[in-house]
Amino acid sequence: MSETHHVCPAERAGFLTGRLRSMVHNPERILAQYVKKGAVVVDIGCGPGFFTCPVAEMAGEEGRVIAVDLQEEMLQKLRQRAGEKGLLSRIELCRADVNSLNVNLKGEADFVLAFYMVHEVPDKEALFTQIYDILKSGGRILIIEPAFHVGKGEFKQTLDIALTKGLEIIESSEGIIDLKALLVKTG
Ligand SMILES: C[S@@+](CC[C@H](N)C(=O)[O-])C[C@H]1O[C@@H](n2cnc3c(N)ncnc32)[C@H](O)[C@@H]1O
């Protein structure tokens, strides 16, 4: 399958936050094991904040959550969602450019989440260079890609790029719905 760089439009944000999504992608089940109180977390390609808000709860008041997205409309939806949940003060919103996350962190993040976003980024070399720089030593990144969009070959290529940037794979799996990999910065 050829690589896909189509960006999920903000008009489809409702699909990302709907009830069906909660059944398939329970944020607690997926993320509680990685996000502890006080953690510094970066949610790249955060969209309307389906994961960002639960992550802000998990990191607590002493945590720091940076939510990054290319589209201002997505950040606006997150702003509203987080405001309604009383979580906005815990979340820093960051507008990315297509090949720059524009995150002002160096070796500080405990955890990076890249949920259904890596296949939308044309320059994955640049993406993983930035992720490596953002992470602290021992920090981890969870990549989850949609199996219905991203082939196993494309996912392997993505992981190969991450490896060339110095990240190491802790575990990976290929399910019917999701392709997943957890990586760590050891250096
Ligand atoms: C399919 S949505 C997933 C949103 C969210 N992670 C979720 O799972 O609900 C992908 C998001 O990644 C964002 N995105 C795509 N390319 C990006 C880039 N180069 N930098 C930052 N965000 C990007 C899109 O704007 C979109 O909001």
Image (tube, grey):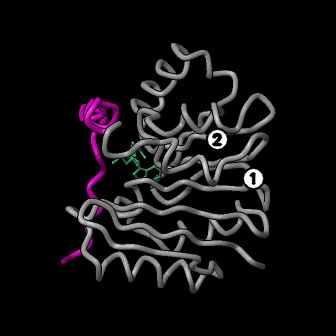
The residue that label 1 is drawn on is: 105
Looking at the rendering, which quadrant does residue 178 occupy? bottom left
Q: Would you say the beta carbon of the disc 1 residue lies within 8 angstroms of ligand 1?
A: no
Q: Is residue 31 left or right of residue 177?
A: right
In the rendered structure, are the residues bearing label 2 and label 1 in contact, judged by CB atoms less than 8 Å apart?
A: yes
Q: Is residue 116 left or right of residue 18?
A: right
Residue 75, position in %: x, y?
48, 31
Which residues lie in the magenta part? 1-21
User: What residue type is disc 2 on?
Assistant: Ile
Quadrant including the C terminus: bottom right
Q: Residue at x 69, y 28 (%)?
A: 90
Quadrant including the N terminus: bottom left
Q: Residue at x 59, y 72 (%)?
A: 183
Mark toward the viewer: 2 or 1: 2
* Earlier residue among tags 2 and 1: 2
Q: Is residue 147 left or right of residue 35?
A: left
Q: Is residue 116 magenta?
A: no
The residue that label 2 is drawn on is: 66
Please determine whether, in this image, residue 38 is positioned above or below residue 72.
Answer: below
